[in-house]
């Protein structure tokens, strides 16, 4: 017989795990590079508005749906009505696809942490750029290292296996003993490392330029229809960063006890996630400007640009590089465990329904689901961001393809449907009653208003914006 699926040991532990899920590559990488591309302050402003009016609303909804059903995402939506099961199914499929590429990127972080150790100690697996003279030489070395690594299939696959192996190991440990215990140590450690990196970054000569880029009001990006595209980019980013629309918060909510204050948690998680995103911006932008690099290199920012920053910092550079990439790795793994758990959990529910107490064990479910994502991830790793010439679906590199299906399509669609469902079709009572079990629902009226009139509209724009971006349709 298999025991209960799991429950959080403490509210602090739950918060660390949920914040750990939210804080990930999205904060440190996506947030910085999208801010770099979408106009600095203009992006920041829209991002904050979306977190408050849309992110918070879906956060409350997902946590409450999970806790009221006591089940993973598929059964939580089915509990509302059989015809809504498909929304839950998307909520299980999309994290599975995300895990396939997320773990490859997590593997890249490990490679970079190792590379900086190599530079520090003069070992052969360094990045080769240490001590480079000037921004140009450092950029060239960093570019070269990155493209050699991603195209080197055995090593990209090897680091991917290492990363996903660690993820599986933690999730096999269970909700409280695995996920919660790990997050309780990892998240405070990440916070301290981030503070150290910020101090270094903002004290570099010339750092003020980066601060100005982030915080000086500048609305040029809003011109014409620009504001819609900023809205769509910021909306997509906010949802990915808050781990919404992919069954994660439903799953984590299902392990919460009835006497926890849901409303408070739903406030704390987005605030912490946003604070860390801004802190990550403070760690990245001033350094990028101080060392004469450009902030708009897009996805290359995290690896190519930042490694060049570390290489051109002198002897102390590799040490900060190591610290920084280890921090990114921690952020990534506390997210990837939540992504895996969101798929393992509904599977355990499903077998429980069929076989009762003889349902699949956590270990077996995790190994099978994790194993599937591991194999899918090997394709992404072997593809090397489209550099190695293997078959590519619809002309996308595999990473973009999986990202398009999950983050681009299922995430906004699922969130929009959740808002329509709770706002209009079945009404918000299910969520309200659940929140009110533990405490008074202070933001109830705000919640209902946004759920009905703001969230569906914004999510529709995000959906169109994502598709527009992926297919370069030029709608906005
Ligand atoms: N929120 C995580 C990040 O910012 C990524 C994530 C996406 C986690 C989807 C869970 C689900 O990187």
Image (spheres, rainbow, N blue to C red):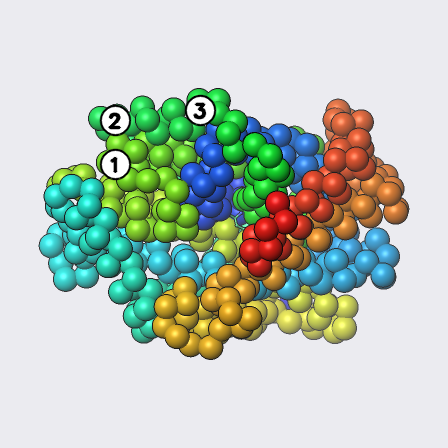
Q: In which quadrant will I find the C terminus?
A: top right
Residue at point 48% right, 63% down?
399
Tell whether circle 2 marks a residue whose Cβ is less than 8 angstroms from ligand 1. Answer: no
Kindly state the secondary structure of the residue where label 2 is placed.
loop
Question: CB under 8 Å between callouts 3 and 1?
Answer: no
Which residue was labeled with disc 2? 206
Q: Position of residue 166 (x, y in %)?
A: 42, 61
Kindly state the secondary structure of the residue where label 3 is placed.
helix
Q: Position of residue 441 (x, y in %)?
A: 77, 28
Neighbour class for label 1 at 10 Å: few (<14), some, many (≥20)? some
Q: Position of residue 178 (x, y in %)?
A: 50, 54
Question: Relative to the observer, which residue lies in front, 118 or 44?
Answer: 44
Which residue was labeled with disc 3? 215
Instruction: Using the image, determine if residue 385 lies above or below residue 46.
Output: below
Question: CB under 8 Å between callouts 1 and 2?
Answer: yes
Whichever of callouts 3 and 1 sits on the residue coming sooner in the sequence is 3
Residue at point 65% right, 46% down?
462
Which residue was labeled with disc 1? 292
Whichever of callouts 1 and 2 sits on the residue coming sooner in the sequence is 2
Q: Is residue 177 left or right of residue 436?
A: left
Q: Can residue 10 be seen from the camera position used here?
A: no
């Amino acid at each position: 017989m298999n025991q209960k699926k799991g429950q959080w040991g403490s509210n602090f532990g739950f918060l660390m795990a949920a914040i750990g899920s939210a804080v990930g590559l999205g904060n440190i990488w996506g947030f910085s590079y999208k801010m770099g591309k979408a106009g600095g302050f203009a992006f920041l402003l829209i991002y904050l508005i979306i977190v408050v009016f849309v992110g918070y609303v879906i956060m409350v909804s997902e946590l409450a749906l999970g806790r009221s059903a006591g089940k993973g995402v598929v059964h939580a939506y089915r509990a509302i009505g059989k015809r809504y099961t498909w929304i839950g199914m998307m909520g299980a499929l999309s994290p599975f696809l995300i895990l396939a590429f997320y773990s490859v990127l997590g593997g890249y972080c490990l490679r970079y942490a190792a590379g900086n150790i190599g530079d520090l100690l003069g070992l052969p697996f360094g990045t080769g750029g240490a001590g480079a003279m000037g921004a140009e030489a450092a950029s060239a070395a960093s570019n070269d290292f990155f493209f050699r690594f991603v195209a080197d299939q055995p090593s990209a696959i090897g680091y991917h296996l290492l990363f996903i192996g660690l993820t599986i190991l933690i999730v096999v440990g269970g909700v409280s003993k695995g996920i919660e215990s790990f997050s309780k140590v990892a998240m405070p450690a990440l916070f301290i490392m981030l503070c150290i990196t910020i101090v270094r970054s903002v004290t570099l000569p010339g750092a003020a330029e980066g601060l100005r880029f982030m915080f000086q009001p500048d609305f040029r990006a809003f011109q014409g229809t620009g504001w819609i595209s900023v809205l769509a980019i910021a909306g997509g980013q906010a949802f990915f960063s808050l781990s919404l629309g992919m069954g994660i918060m439903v799953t984590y909510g299902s392990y919460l006890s009835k006497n926890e204050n849901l409303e408070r948690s739903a406030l704390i998680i987005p605030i912490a996630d946003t604070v860390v995103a801004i802190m990550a911006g403070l760690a990245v932008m001033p350094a990028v400007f101080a060392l004469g690099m450009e902030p708009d290199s897009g996805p290359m920012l995290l690896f190519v640009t930042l490694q060049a920053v570390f290489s051109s910092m002198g002897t102390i550079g590799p040490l900060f590089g190591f610290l920084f990439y280890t921090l990114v790795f921690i952020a990534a793994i506390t997210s990837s465990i939540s992504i895996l758990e969101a798929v393992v959990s509904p599977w355990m529910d499903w077998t429980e329904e069929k076989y009762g107490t003889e349902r699949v064990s956590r270990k077996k479910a995790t190994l099978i689901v994790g194993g599937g994502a591991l194999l899918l991830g090997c394709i992404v790793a072997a593809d090397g961001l489209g550099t190695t010439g293997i078959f590519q679906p619809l002309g996308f590199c595999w990473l973009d393809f999986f990202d398009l299906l999950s983050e681009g399509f299922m995430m906004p669609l699922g969130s929009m449907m959740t808002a329509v469902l709770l706002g209009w079709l079945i009404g918000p009572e299910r969520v309200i009653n659940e929140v009110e079990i533990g405490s008074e629902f202070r933001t109830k009226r705000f919640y209902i208003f946004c759920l009905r009139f703001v969230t569906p509209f914004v999510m529709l724009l995000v959906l169109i914006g994502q598709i527009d971006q992926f297919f370069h349709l030029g709608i906005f």
